[in-house]
Image (cartoon, grey):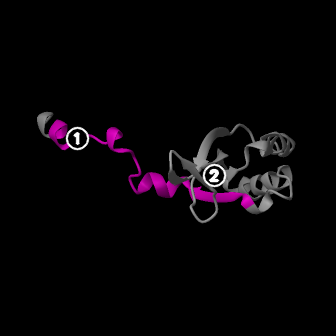
Amino acid sequence: MKKLEAVLESECLDGVLDAFRRASLGAFQATPITTFAPDRHPNAVYRGARHSVGTERLKLEILLRDQDVDAAIDAIRRGVDPRDAASIELVVIDVADSISRGALPDWRRPSRHLAAATR
């Protein structure tokens, strides 16, 4: 099992959605995010102070079988306008590795105090 995360421009969602339907890849989660990179994003002045302005983007997350990863990457590339293709960020994570390394958030881990009290 793999998790594919893609960060792309919000306007690309319709094209990626159509490409995912054609490839029969299933459902995915789309979350609006703001990215900050001082070297690439414009600065703004607010009340005399200069600050970095974030760029509104979209983060797609989908769980895939190992054999479907290449098809999903191709679908994302087909669904995105070629002018925006350079701004896509893709990350593929092996789900088994993240689970076996104890990648649970702190609130999901049992507390040492709770474990001692239950003995």
- Residue 48 in percent (x, y) is at 50, 50
- Per the rendering, the mark at residue 111 is 1
Q: Which residue is at a point 71% across and 37% down the rendered structure image? A: 27
Residue 118 % position (x, y) = 15, 33
Residue tagged 2? 5
Q: Please give the name of the residue rendered at 72% of the width and 57% of the height, measured from the top-left corner.
A: 88
The segment highlighted magenta reads 87-115
The answer to which of 80 and 96 lies nearer the viewer is 80
Q: Decide whether residue 107 is among the magenta residues.
A: yes
Please tell me whether residue 81 belongs to the stretch shown in magenta: no
Q: Which of marks 2 and 1 is in front?
A: 2
- Give amino acid for label 1: Ser
Residue toward you, 24 or 5: 5
Q: Is residue 104 left or right of residue 18?
A: left
* Left-right relation of 33 to 81: left
Q: Left of 118 or right of it: where is 84?
A: right
